C-alpha cells in the first residue's frame, strides 16, 4: 500500500475495509484538516506554462493561498503529484476551493488526473457535479470530484479551465485528497469453479494485492487456477541481464499452491513488457538465443513442478492475418525476437521450456484466434512444429472479446485446434462493452447483452470440455480489470455479481430466460 509523505501531515490516510454480504456502500478515509498552504506548497507546482506563488492576505481560511499566473493554455497552471498517497485501482476524491483573480472574469474549472504507466500517459476528468464549476472573480468556489484510479507509476492531479479561461489567473485554497474504500460484497453465491468442476479449471488473473484479505477469499470461492496478470512477465522477472526478481512471483505461486490452486505461468517470450536489453537492434543471433534460452530456463526451472502450464510464446502473430495463412512464417508479427533470431525463436523457446520442466504443459498463447486467418496461421504453425517434435501441448485462446465477437467463430477455432490433438484453454477471457458511457454507467441493456455473450460462450466451452483444459477470466472485477473503462468481467468493482455471473453459472437457463434459446 502506498501511503505517507506529502499530504501525510494534513490528511490522515487510514481506512476500514469491511466485508459485507449485502450492503453496497462506501466508507471514506478520514481526511483530517484540509491543506490551506499556511506552511508551504504541499507539493503543488506549475503545470506547463505558468507560475505558482504562495500569497499572504488572500485566502479562504488561514492567511495563505496559492496564486496561479502566466498561463497560456487551458491545461496550464497547477498540479500536484499524488503517486505516494493514491492507491491504484481505488476510488479517490479531490476537493479544493478556487477563485478567479479580480481581472480574470468568470472562469470554468475542471478537475483532472494524469496517469503515467510504463511511459504511457492518459488523462481523465474527475466526475461529480462539482468537478466542473464556473467561478466568479473574487468569489471562493468549492470544487470536488470523484475518480476511480487506474494503475499508475505516477499520477498527477491538476486543474484546467475551459478555452475561454486559458490565460486566467486564479487562486486555490483548502485542498483535500481522500481515498475511498469500497466495501467488498462477497455474496453467498455458488462457486464458479465448483459448478465447472466436471468441465475444466476455472481461473482468474491476479494482482499481488489480490492474494490476501477479502479479495483472496473471493478468489478461493470462485477460482481454482491462478495466472499472474503481470508479475511473471520478462520485464518483471529479469529487468536487467542476470538480475532475476522473483519475490512477488514467488509469493503468488506459494499462496496459490498452499490453497490447492493450479498455478499458470504467463509468459516467457513476448514482445511487450519485456526488457529491451534481451534483444536490442543489432544484437547477434547467438547472443539473442542465449538471452532467450537463459531466461526461459531460469524461470521455468525455478517453478518446476509448481507451475502447471506455461504460456511459452505470447502473441507471435499480428492482430489479424489476411494473406496466405498457411504460410505462417511470412505472417509472424515483426518483433525484436523475430528480428534477432528469425522464426526459430518459437521452437527454441518451447524446447528450452520443455528441457527445464518436462512435465509442464506448454502453450502457445494469442488473441483474436477466432479470426479465421489468424486461426489458420496458428493452426499451421502448431501442426508443423509438433510434426517436427517441438513440445507444444496447448493453444491458449486469450479471449479478449467484445459485444461484436461472433461466438460461432470462437467455436470454429476450438474445433479446428482440437484437430491438432492439443489442449485448448481460454486464457484471458473478458468481454468489453464499448458503448458504455464513461465509468459509472453500464446500462442494464448492455449488461444483458454482455451476459448473453458470456452464456453463449460458456455453452460452447461446456460442449467442448473434452479438449478445454481451463477457462481463465482476465481479472477479478470491473474496477481492477486492464479494461476497467469497459466493464469487461462478471463481477462489479465491489465484487458483487453482474448478470454475466448468472449467465456463466447456468448458460442454458440464462439464454432461455432471455429468449435467446427457445424450445
Ligand atoms: C495486460 C495486463 O492485464 C495489464 O495490467 C498490463 O498493463 C498490460 O498487460 N494479453 C496478454 C496479457 O497476454 O499479458 C495482457 O495483460 C493483456 C493482453
Image (cartoon, helix red, strand yellow):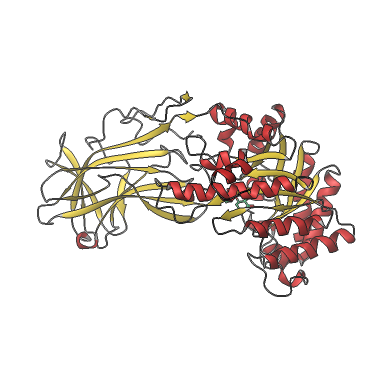
Can residue 11 be seen here? The reply is yes
Give the residue displayed 84% in from the left and 48% down from the top. 354
Q: Residue furthest bottom?
A: 323
Left or right of 455 in this view: 138: left
Picture quadrant of residue 288: bottom right
The residue closer to the viewer here, 422 or 70, is 422
Left or right of 454 in this view: 494: left
Picture quadrant of residue 257: top right
Give the residue displayed 11% in from the left and 40% down from the top. 57
The residue closer to the viewer here, 21 or 175, is 21
Query: How many numbered marks appear?
Result: 0
Can residue 239 be seen here? The reply is no
Q: Position of residue 199 (x, y in %)?
A: 74, 40
Q: Position of residue 248 (x, y in %)?
A: 63, 37
Image: 493 above or below 379: above
Image: 240 above or below 177: below
Q: Position of residue 457 (x, y in %)?
A: 64, 50
Q: Position of residue 420 (x, y in %)?
A: 83, 57
The residue closer to the viewer here, 53 or 58, is 58
Give the residue displayed 49% in from the left and 39% down from the top. 492
Left or right of 308 in this view: 213: left
Amino acid at each position: 500500500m502506498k501511503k505517507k509523505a506529502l499530504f501525510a501531515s494534513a490528511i490522515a490516510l487510514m481506512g476500514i475495509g469491511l466485508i459485507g454480504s449485502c450492503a453496497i456502500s462506501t466508507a471514506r478515509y478520514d481526511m483530517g484538516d484540509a491543506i490551506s498552504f499556511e506552511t508551504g506548497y504541499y507539493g503543488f507546482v506549475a503545470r506547463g506554462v505558468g507560475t505558482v506563488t504562495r500569497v499572504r492576505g488572500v485566502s479562504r481560511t488561514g492567511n495563505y493561498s496559492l496564486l496561479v499566473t502566466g498561463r497560456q493554455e487551458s491545461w496550464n497552471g497547477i498540479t500536484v503529484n499524488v503517486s505516494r498517497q493514491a492507491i491504484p485501482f481505488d476510488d479517490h476524491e479531490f476537493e479544493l476551493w478556487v477563485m478567479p483573480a479580480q481581472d480574470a472574469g468568470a472562469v470554468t474549472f475542471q478537475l483532472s488526473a494524469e496517469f503515467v504507466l510504463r511511459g504511457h500517459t492518459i488523462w481523465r476528468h474527475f466526475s461529480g457535479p462539482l468537478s466542473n464549476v464556473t467561478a466568479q472573480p473574487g468569489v471562493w468556489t468549492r470544487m470536488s470530484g470523484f475518480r476511480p484510479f487506474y494503475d499508475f507509476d505516477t499520477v498527477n492531479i491538476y486543474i484546467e479551465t475551459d478555452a475561454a479561461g486559458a490565460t486566467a489567473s486564479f487562486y486555490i485554497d483548502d485542498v483535500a485528497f481522500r481515498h475511498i474504500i469500497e466495501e467488498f460484497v462477497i455474496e453467498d453465491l455458488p462457486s464458479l469453479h465448483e459448478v465447472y468442476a466436471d468441465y475444466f479449471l476455472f481461473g482468474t488473473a491476479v494482482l499481488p494485492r489480490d492474494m490476501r484479505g477479502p479479495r483472496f477469499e473471493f478468489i478461493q470461492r470462485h477460482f481454482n487456477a491462478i495466472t499472474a496478470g503481470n508479475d511473471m512477465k520478462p520485464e518483471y522477472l529479469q529487468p536487467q541481464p542476470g538480475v532475476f526478481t522473483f519475490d512477488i512471483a514467488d509469493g503468488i505461486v506459494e499462496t496459490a499452491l498452499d490453497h490447492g490452486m493450479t498455478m499458470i505461468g504467463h509468459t516467457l517470450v513476448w514482445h511487450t513488457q519485456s526488457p529491451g536489453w534481451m534483444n536490442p537492434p543489432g544484437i547477434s543471433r547467438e547472443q539473442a538465443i542465449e538471452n532467450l534460452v537463459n531466461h526461459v530456463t531460469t524461470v521455468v526451472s525455478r517453478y518446476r513442478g509448481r507451475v502447471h502450464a506455461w504460456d511459452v510464446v505470447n502473441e507471435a502473430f499480428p492482430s489479424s492475418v489476411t494473406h496466405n495463412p498457411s504460410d505462417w512464417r511470412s505472417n509472424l508479427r515483426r518483433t525484436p525476437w523475430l528480428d534477432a533470431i528469425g522464426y526459430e525463436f518459437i521452437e527454441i523457446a518451447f524446447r528450452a521450456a520443455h528441457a527445464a520442466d518436462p512435465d509442464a504443459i506448454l502453450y502457445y498463447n494469442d488473441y483474436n484466434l477466432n479470426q479465421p486467418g489468424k486461426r489458420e496461421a496458428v493452426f499451421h504453425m502448431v501442426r508443423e512444429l509438433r510434426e517436427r517434435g517441438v513440445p507444444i501441448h496447448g493453444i491458449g485462446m486469450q479471449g479478449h472479446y467484445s459485444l461484436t465477437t461472433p461466438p460461432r467463430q470462437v467455436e470454429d477455432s476450438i474445433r479446428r485446434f482440437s484437430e491438432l490433438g492439443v489442449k485448448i484453454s481460454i486464457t484471458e477471457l473478458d468481454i468489453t462493452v464499448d458503448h458504455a458511457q464513461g465509468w459509472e454507467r453500464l446500462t442494464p441493456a448492455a449488461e444483458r447483452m454482455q451476459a448473453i455473450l458470456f452464456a453463449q460462450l460458456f455453452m460452447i466451452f461446456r460442449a467442448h470440455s473434452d479438449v478445454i483444459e481451463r477457462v481463465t477470466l482476465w481479472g477479478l472485477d470491473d474496477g481492477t480489470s486492464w479494461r476497467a473503462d469497459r466493464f469487461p468481467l462478471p463481477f462489479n468493482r465491489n465484487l458483487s455479481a453482474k448478470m454475466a455471473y448468472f449467465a456463466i453459472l447456468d448458460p442454458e437457463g440464462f439464454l432461455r430466460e432471455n429468449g435467446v434459446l427457445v424450445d
